[in-house]
Amino acid sequence: MFRSRTMTGMFLVAALGLPLVAAGCSSGGSSTATTASTSSTATTSSSGTKAATGSPITIAYVSSLTGEGASQDGSSPAGFTARLDLQNAEGGIDGHKLVPMIIDDQTNPSGISTAVQSAVSGALGIVSQSPLFFLAAKYPQQAGVPVTGSYDDGPEWGQQPYTNMFASDNGSVNPSYPVNTQIGDFLKAHGGTNLGAYGYGISPSSSRAAIGTSKSFEHAGGTTGVLDTTVPFGGVDFTSAALVAKQHNIDSMVPALDNNSNYALATSLEQAGVKLKTVLFATGYEPDTIGSPVWNTLKGDYFLSLFRPWSLPNAATQQMQAAMEKYAGFTSTQFPTFGQNEAWAGADLMIKGLLLAGPNPTRSAVISKLRGVTSYNVNGLLPVTLDYATNFGKNPPQTCAWIMKAEQSGFTLNSPTPTCGTDLPHTATASGS
């Protein structure tokens, strides 16, 4: 199911001058960081930025920089480090400089435990953008380490005893995965009648997303021709799946997969002669998708954007864009990948917790303060406001995202208003109901 470990992405990160820990490797002498030293000052330079001169605070970032997950997250550390760089330019955390610790889990289920334990031993907090984090979430929970980041790996973000975890993109997760109306209503409104839904077998969130999409579409009045929740993680051979889709006459598709699998599936369906009226991808609204070999296949398809697109600017997008141009080498026409957005948001929420925890933050103080936050939206990047004080184990009242359409020369906004949906009462996909 998983390819053998590779070193390719490590050299990429190392070339950026970032400390990297690979799954299966030691953190190289980093000691347990549970609190910041009491010595901290911030001085203002001639350019107006504040230099953080206090003892450093290490924040770990765990993601899949190599292996199958790299197609989704290989470039994601840029969002994480840019947010830390921006904070350091503003004086850090009460004078404490933030130091990134980049950890590659290599998309390897047997190595994720080592990767996360390295983060626990070497950093005050962890930002996760790993599809495998659910396999090792117990280690930071037992050590009392705050974790922020993306909820799309599994249900632990809303399960007891994982109250140390804060999804910066969703707030929390209802572990029963209730059916939501958002995707079904959109597909039906755009001509879909017979759905193909696909998810990874190893990923709880991916497989449940596929089941939820099926039930959402059926609630909107459509039918499900194909529901496949057995796709190997990172799989790209969809020859048989395309034949099944053609036999069942699907005319709409929503794959809850990573980019490489999504595009391989779309290509296979086209080659098999499957005629699709509407396609909605959860990821893929990214610069390198435009003009790629698969771009002609994707034209006319729709893409979710959980974070506010830079083409719809506000103060939050302008802040992020300026930081990515200054610290990550972005051009003025570039926009972030899904992983870079998630990494920025995870870092932003961790920084909020550190600032709230006082001049010498501890792990426990960060957790306590974040659990009291009632209104958070990554400064305006999210279409909804998250409440960490009362919503643990619950989904937000609405699920919303902007939707982009692949046109001839790039992506365009389907609407400046996010498309939203609500959970259907008394539904739960976790039990297959």
Image (tube, rainbow, N blue to C red):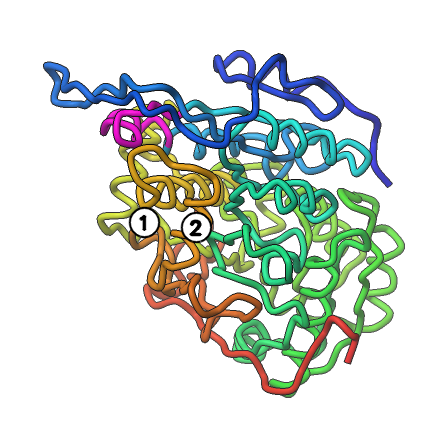
Q: Position of residue 227 (x, y in %)?
A: 79, 69
Q: Is residue 345 left or right of residue 223?
A: left
Quadrant of res 331: top left
What label sits on residue 311 in the rendered view? 1
Q: Does the segment drawn in magenta span residue 285?
A: no
The residue positioned 79% from the left and 44% from the top of the image is 235
Quick one: SS at disc 1? Answer: loop
Q: If the image is split into quadrants, where does the C terminus sit?
A: bottom right
Which residue is label 2 attached to? Answer: 411
Q: Is residue 130 left or right of residue 47?
A: right
Quick one: SS at disc 2? Answer: strand
Label 1 vs label 2, nearer the camera = 1
Q: Nearer the viewer, residue 330 or 159?
A: 159
| Image mark count | 2
What label sits on residue 9 in the rendered view? none
Q: Are dots 1 and 2 in contact, CB under 8 Å?
A: yes
Query: What type is the residue that disc 1 sits on?
Result: Ser
Q: Does the segment drawn in magenta span residue 87?
A: yes
Query: What type is the residue that disc 2 sits on?
Result: Phe
Q: Position of residue 293 (x, y in %)?
A: 62, 37
Give the magenta-colored segment's residue range.
84-98
Q: Position of residue 18 (x, y in %)?
A: 50, 17
The residue positioned 54% from the left and 71% from the top of the image is 394
Note whether 336 is above or below 398 in the view shown: above
The residue positioned 58% from the left and 54% from the top of the image is 151
Quadrant of res 154: bottom right
Note whether 33 is above or below 126 in the view shown: above
Q: If the image is split into quadrants, where does the N terminus sit?
A: top right
Q: Along the polypeptide, which appears first: circle 1 or circle 2?
A: 1
Note whether 277 is above or below 307 in the view shown: below
Note whether 6 is above or below 2 in the view shown: above
